[in-house]
């Protein structure tokens, strides 16, 4: 590892969990996850922040743990955004060039993108992303990149991702209360795509289905561009709720039942096999639930999700351009036999997307479909760094200085940590590096406004 390296921090604020990751990018452009924490969510429903104060408490916990784990303090993060309020609108911009004797420049292409920001939006909406789809130079259509071409008129078609201002403000409030600055809000399906899709899939056509706890996100890619996006207001949580109501269980019992014994395809469920759930209340009889009946509950809801997916695929206009079929990711992708169900219902090729394929190092702790968005946010964060090198301050940290011996070496064994830490300088009044670091962390996360960054 280089003595000085660039780091990116990302936080996936999901309905069921909040995940924080710290990544480093090596010279070969591969990203390595060097820190990872997660906690159960609070104050979030169907992908949207409802209670910023509750959310901020969880964020602070995962961030404190992450910064202690990595030994790095940071104040800027890349954050995902999802929810039913997300919309995609289409727009076309163009202008007549002052001279057609010179080739089209990157500045002219950027000018079109800037003009797209002036699109008329519904009240209470804000632009998240402006995604160029194709360009037109005079009468030449469907051009991927017009730079270097000659022509009198330049036009572009855009897909513009917009979100509710109120929803954005609640997310921003959650992070400002945690003394963190959001460097960029990123549409979660875009992030997940970076983590689990291959370039060949995005070029030949693919549908990404991210089944989260509160929502199911759909993103259709063709010719390496996002062509269509949609959000369904239900995901894994609604399956748990169906099991709870149908079987007369509490929510935790229903979730455990789904995870341990649930299958997405009734025909794959074992016949004549029951699950016995012991009664926790004296005098109550244990419950017996058929595995096949459990599968029928799960498949009924999954069939509904698949119907919605197929509607969006047809509505997108790209149904006949999906050479690589479907990639499923998110926590819901871990349901057994879910690939078979999607193949049976859609007639398409299906695979499950794991984020570890796009990482280096030892990504086992995050190589899980439920962490696809978090890993993707890291990758998108480094893309942002590349695009804004001249205008952003990168987080740099001398990774050796924290442990190297400079003046004299002393050791300290903390009661809560078996590791021996070599200190860089003689500690003041016998204070350990860990305790001094902990003091810094407490000061950094102080509640008083004057300490906020």
Image (spheres, rainbow, N blue to C red):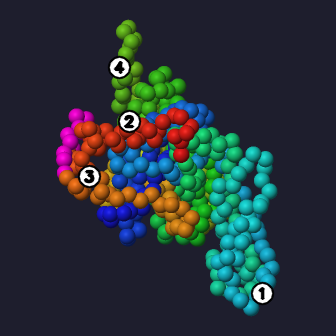
Q: Which residue is mark 3?
A: 424
Of helix, strand and loop, which one carries label 4? loop
Q: In the image, residue 49 lies at what x, y percent?
A: 59, 38
Query: Mark 1 or mark 4, which has the lower sequence index?
Result: 1
Q: Is residue 429 magenta?
A: no
Query: In the rendered image, is residue 349 in sight?
Result: no
Q: Which residue is mark 2?
A: 261
In depth, the one of 307 and 80 nearer the eye is: 80
Distance from Cα at disc 1 to Cα at disc 3: 62 Å
Kindly identify which numbered label has been placed on residue 99. 1
Kindly identify which numbered label has been placed on residue 112. none
- Name the residue: 53% across, 34% down: 448
Q: Find residue 102 and report its image quarter.
A: bottom right
How many residues crowd around disc 1 within 10 Å: few (fewer than 14), some, or many (20 or more)?
A: few
Position above or below: 144 against 324:
below
Labels 1, 2: front one: 1
Q: Which residue is mark 4?
A: 278
Q: In the image, residue 27 lies at what x, y percent?
A: 37, 70
Position above or below: 206 against 258:
below
Distance from Cα at disc 2 to Cα at disc 4: 16 Å
How many residues crowd around disc 4 within 10 Å: few (fewer than 14), some, or many (20 or more)?
A: few
Labels 3, 4: front one: 3
Of helix, strand and loop, which one carries label 1? loop
Left or right: 127, with 54 as reference point: right
């Amino acid at each position: 590892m280089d003595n000085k390296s660039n780091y990116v921090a990302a936080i996936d604020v999901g309905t069921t969990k909040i995940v924080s990751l710290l990544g480093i990018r090596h010279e070969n452009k591969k990203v390595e996850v060097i820190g990872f924490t997660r906690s159960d969510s609070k104050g979030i429903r169907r992908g949207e922040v409802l209670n910023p104060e509750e959310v901020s408490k969880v964020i602070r916990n995962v961030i404190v743990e992450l910064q202690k784990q990595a030994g790095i303090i940071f104040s800027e993060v890349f954050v995902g955004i999802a929810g039913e309020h997300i919309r995609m609108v289409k727009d076309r911009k163009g202008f007549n060039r002052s001279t057609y004797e010179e080739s089209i420049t990157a500045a002219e292409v950027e000018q079109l993108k800037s003009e797209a920001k002036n699109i008329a939006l519904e009240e209470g909406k804000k632009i998240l992303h402006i995604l160029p789809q194709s360009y037109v130079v005079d009468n030449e259509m469907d051009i991927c990149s017009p730079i270097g071409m000659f022509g009198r008129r330049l036009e572009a078609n855009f897909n513009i991702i917009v979100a509710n201002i109120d929803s954005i403000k609640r997310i921003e409030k959650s992070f400002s209360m945690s003394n963190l600055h959001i460097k960029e809000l990123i549409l979660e399906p875009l992030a997940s795509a970076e983590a689990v899709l291959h370039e060949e899939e995005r070029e030949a056509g693919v549908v990404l289905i991210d089944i989260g706890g509160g929502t199911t996100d759909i993103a259709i890619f063709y010719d390496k561009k996002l062509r269509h996006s949609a959000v369904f207001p239900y995901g894994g949580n609604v399956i748990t709720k169906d099991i709870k109501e149908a079987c007369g269980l509490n929510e935790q019992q229903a979730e455990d039942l789904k995870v341990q014994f649930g299958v997405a395809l009734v025909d794959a469920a074992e016949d004549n096999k029951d699950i016995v759930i012991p009664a926790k209340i004296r005098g109550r009889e244990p419950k017996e639930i058929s595995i096949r009946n459990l599968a029928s509950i799960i498949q009924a809801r999954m069939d509904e999700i698949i119907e919605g997916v197929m509607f969006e695929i047809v509505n997108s206009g790209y149904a006949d351009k999906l050479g690589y079929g479907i990639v499923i990711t998110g926590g819901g992708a871990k349901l057994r036999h879910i690939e078979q169900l999607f193949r049976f219902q859609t007639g398409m090729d299906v695979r499950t997307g794991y984020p570890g394929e796009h990482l280096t190092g030892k990504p086992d702790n995050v190589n899980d479909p439920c962490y696809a968005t978090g890993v993707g946010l890291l990758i998108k964060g480094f893309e942002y760094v590349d695009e804004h090198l001249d205008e952003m301050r990168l987080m740099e940290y001398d990774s050796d200085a924290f442990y190297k011996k400079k003046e004299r070496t002393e050791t300290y064994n903390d009661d809560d940590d078996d590791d021996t830490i070599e200190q860089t300088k003689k500690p003041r009044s016998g204070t350990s590096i860990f305790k001094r670091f902990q003091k810094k962390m407490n000061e950094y996360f102080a509640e008083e406004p004057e300490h906020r960054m």
